[in-house]
């Protein structure tokens, strides 16, 4: 029996011990996947919750253009998922947004090695000096690393994905899109919610929140917390450990101060921690010719590896663990000055990541520990001034400043079998560490104006000028081990390395209201992602000039329409897009000496992404809600010479390859996600509901060298849920069962490195079938 009474009792005890009551939402677990209501700013409260017993599709409010608007009136491709939809499906991790958002591929190796790609752009190798092509915002605050969102996504109001370059309205400029996470506001009406779940793989989770007035109608507060535990699903056959589970805790507190109708202040503080035996990659392919090179090599040094067709077994001999601690705070103030609005957002965040990795992937003690520890702090300040809506001219202007610094350390610790593994006996029991300091100053001015020419025609123009200042210092510490190793990996100091860039972003769009609920639009936009300096010691034969990476620049073209038809029973949104990227940031081979090439992260040339996106919602009969999110994306390297070679090419004697014309790594061409929800009154206040959604994506390359041996095969994930909800003494309750990856589909999420001399590939396994039950109380 997968839900044990002890789990529920323990969950209740945890919540009780923290003295946090639970909060209630007006929805029940039958919320459709794409429905959501978002606050426009800290002063506004969410609209009434969707009522899916109606015969119509509910409206969705977003603040994508920094004013509250119906999402169907915004001439931007936007996908929206409500926090309730994620909660009801048992989805609370960043990588699970893969199953909810079109054109999106989230790859998760560990929090530091998290990448978010939209339309094929953004799956760059983990590098602490470079920013993501897709910006992640939490309550209007830009997160300097995507991994900062790798926490339990608790008490969310809404997740919105804006596709295409952004920057003329958002604090930070991006080339591929923005993922905007909004949490629920404090309320002036008391709300309490408690939720407990239990399932297989030892899973249990408790979540609770409380919201209400603290001082009449002037001050309100909200507290949210979560604790999540799950045993690992990857077995280390060396000692029987279970890896790739998680152990997470998080808390968020908020205050909303609203002394007058013209001023509000929202204060948010949060803290999250994770200590998990994660994140092991599994051997995906042993290499060409049945892995002849790799497997014979491992046998020759007395090692053991496992090639499990389900990718759920590994052979490690050292600890596999990660520790993450992060937190921060923000203050968003809104002043209404006559008909005009002034907004200030001040924020601070810190993030600390400490990994422990068995890096050789075998049963021998070759590389005991290797990884990169990160200590990251950031400060940001945004000021915006907005004119009134509903006029012929509507304008938003703003200033933005972002500062980030990191004190990081990379380390490689070799064991007694390192000599046999590397072919260099002097590596035995040696160690090398490199200290890194990275800093960023980013300042920008931006503006966007919409001219409502007539009741049907609107023109929008926007511009942003960004100044970026990057600085880095790399210091390799004295090595330990044999004299030969110490000489080979001796001290090094780069001195202070700096780069300065200015980038311009721009937007021009036209929209035409064909009918009251049908909007057509076309746009062209230009975006830029900052350059950087690789925080690594230059390879032999190269100078520090090889460490510099130029900004990545994108020009995007969109044509689409949004429609709500048949008295709000059918909603159809579609758009065509074409994005051209120059100076795309990826791995390339640089010639360190005649005929000798080494890998470096640099600008490879050009990339093109083009395709079509279609989003449907329908209410054919009362209580039945059908949806479809789908996209076709052709992301191609237009020019990519001197690319890393695949294992197949290396086995054939090639060392330098050309991937021009090939599919971009981590970019499936097709992503299709149908869903269905049904609810029906059984009797009185008792309602039954059921839902299913399916997420399918076509195959894609899982390694940066585009090896067929590392190609991620096409896969689809089916998620199911069903239950009942009702009322007792005016308090709401819900009970439902759920199953994610219900068919137990075997799949991987890709890898993060190209082939080595031994020609094998490892990838990160996806979650197996998980199932359980959840009880929710709202009062």
Image (cartoon, rainbow, N blue to C red):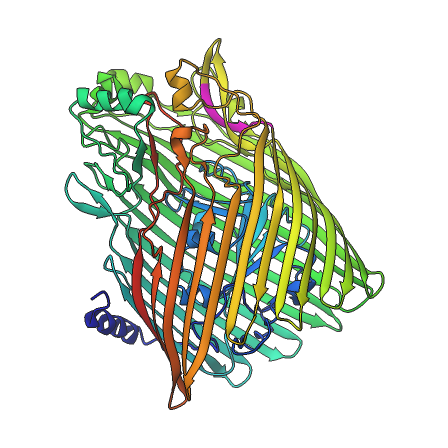
Q: Residue at x 30, y 73 (%)?
A: 15
Residue at the image point whose x is 49% and y is 34% from the top: 472
Res 198 → quadrant: bottom left
- Front-most of 655 and 290? 290
- Quadrant of the rendering where the C terminus is positioned: bottom left
- In the image, 489 versus 314, the foreground residue is 314
Q: Position of residue 584 (x, y in %)?
A: 58, 33
Q: Which residues make up the magenta segment?
A: 598-605
User: Residue 597 at x, y = what percent?
Assistant: 46, 16
Quadrant of the snapshot with the N terminus:
bottom left
Q: x and y percent of residue 4 in the render?
A: 21, 69
Tally of numbered discs: 0
In the figure, is residue 194 to the left or right of 239?
Answer: right
Horizontal relation, residue 618 to residue 235: left or right: right
Predominant secondary structure in magenta?
strand
Of residues 80 and 216, the one drawn nearer to the viewer in this rendering: 80
């Amino acid at each position: 029996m997968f839900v044990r009474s002890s789990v529920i009792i323990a969950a209740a005890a945890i919540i009780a011990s923290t003295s946090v009551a639970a909060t209630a939402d007006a929805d029940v677990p039958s919320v459709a996947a794409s429905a959501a209501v978002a606050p426009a700013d800290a002063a506004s409260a969410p609209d009434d919750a969707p009522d899916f017993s109606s015969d119509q599709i509910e409206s969705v409010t977003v603040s994508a253009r920094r004013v509250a608007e119906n999402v169907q009136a915004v001439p931007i491709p936007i996908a929206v998922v409500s926090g309730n939809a994620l909660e009801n499906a048992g989805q609370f991790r960043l990588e699970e947004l893969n199953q909810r958002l079109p054109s999106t591929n989230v790859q998760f190796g560990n929090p530091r090695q998290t990448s978010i790609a939209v339309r094929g752009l953004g799956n760059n190798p983990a590098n602490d000096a470079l920013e993501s092509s897709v910006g992640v915002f939490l309550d209007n605050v830009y997160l300097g690393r995507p991994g900062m969102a790798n926490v339990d996504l608790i008490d969310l109001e809404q997740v919105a994905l804006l596709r295409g370059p952004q920057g003329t309205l958002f604090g930070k400029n991006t080339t591929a899109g923005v993922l905007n996470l909004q949490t629920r506001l404090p309320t002036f009406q008391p709300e309490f919610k408690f939720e407990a779940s239990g399932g297989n793989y030892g899973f249990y989770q408790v979540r609770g929140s409380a919201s209400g007035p603290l001082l009449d109608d002037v001050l309100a507060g909200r507290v949210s917390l979560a604790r999540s535990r799950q045993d690992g699903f990857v077995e280390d056959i060396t000692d029987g450990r279970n890896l790739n589970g998680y152990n997470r805790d998080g808390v968020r507190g908020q205050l909303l101060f609203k002394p007058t109708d013209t001023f509000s202040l929202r204060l948010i503080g949060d803290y999250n921690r994770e200590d998990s035996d994660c994140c092991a990659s599994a051997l995906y392919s042993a290499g060409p010719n049945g892995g002849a090179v790799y497997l014979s090599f491992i046998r020759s040094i007395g090692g053991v590896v496992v090639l499990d067709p389900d990718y759920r077994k590994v052979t490690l001999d050292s600890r596999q663990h990660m520790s993450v601690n992060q937190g921060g705070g923000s203050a968003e103030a809104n002043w209404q000055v006559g008909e005009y609005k002034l907004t200030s957002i001040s924020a601070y965040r810190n993030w600390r990541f400490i990994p422990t990795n068995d890096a050789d992937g075998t049963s021998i003690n070759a590389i005991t520990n290797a990884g990169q520890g990160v200590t990251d702090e950031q400060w940001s300040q945004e000021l915006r001034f907005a004119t009134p809506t509903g006029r012929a001219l509507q304008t938003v202007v703003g200033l933005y400043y972002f500062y980030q610094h990191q004190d990081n350390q990379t380390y490689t610790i070799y064991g007694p079998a390192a000599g046999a593994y590397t072919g260099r006996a002097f590596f035995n029991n040696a160690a090398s560490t490199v200290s890194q300091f990275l800093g960023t100053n980013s300042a920008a001015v931006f503006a966007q104006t919409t001219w409502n020419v007539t009741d049907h025609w609107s023109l929008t123009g926007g511009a942003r000028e960004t100044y970026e200042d990057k600085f880095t210092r790399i210091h390799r510490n004295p090595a330990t081990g044999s004299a030969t190793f110490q000489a080979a990996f001796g001290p090094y100091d780069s001195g202070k390395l700096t780069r300065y860039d200015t980038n311009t972003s721009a937007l021009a769009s036209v929209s035409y209201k064909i009918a009251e609920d049908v909007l057509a639009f076309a746009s062209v936009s230009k975006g830029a992602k900052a350059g950087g300096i690789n925080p690594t010691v230059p390879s032999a034969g190269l100078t520090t000039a090889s460490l510099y990476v130029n900004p990545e620049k994108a020009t995007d073209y969109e044509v689409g329409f949004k429609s709500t038809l048949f008295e709000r029973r059918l909603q159809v949104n579609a758009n065509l897009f074409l994005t051209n990227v120059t100076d795309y940031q990826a791995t390339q081979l640089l010639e360190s000496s005649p005929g000798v090439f080494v890998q470096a992260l640099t600008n490879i040339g050009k990339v093109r992404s083009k395709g079509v996106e279609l989003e449907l919602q329908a209410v054919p009969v009362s209580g039945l809600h059908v949806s479809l999110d789908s996209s076709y994306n052709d992301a191609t390297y237009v020019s990519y010479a001197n690319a890393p070679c695949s294992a197949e090419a290396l086995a054939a004697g090639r060392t330098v390859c050309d991937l021009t014309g090939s599919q971009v790594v981590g970019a499936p061409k097709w992503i299709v996600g149908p869903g269905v929800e049904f609810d029906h009154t059984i009797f009185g206040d008792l309602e039954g509901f059921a839902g299913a959604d399916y997420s399918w994506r076509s195959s894609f390359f899982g390694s940066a060298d585009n090896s067929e041996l590392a190609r991620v095969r096409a896969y689809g994930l089916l998620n199911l849920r069903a239950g009942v909800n009702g009322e007792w003494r005016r308090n709401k309750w819900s009970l439902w069962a759920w199953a994610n990856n219900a068919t137990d589909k075997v799949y991987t999420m890709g890898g993060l490195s190209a082939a080595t001399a031994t020609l094998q590939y490892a990838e990160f396994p996806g979650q197996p079938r998980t199932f359980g039950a959840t009880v929710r109380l709202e009062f």
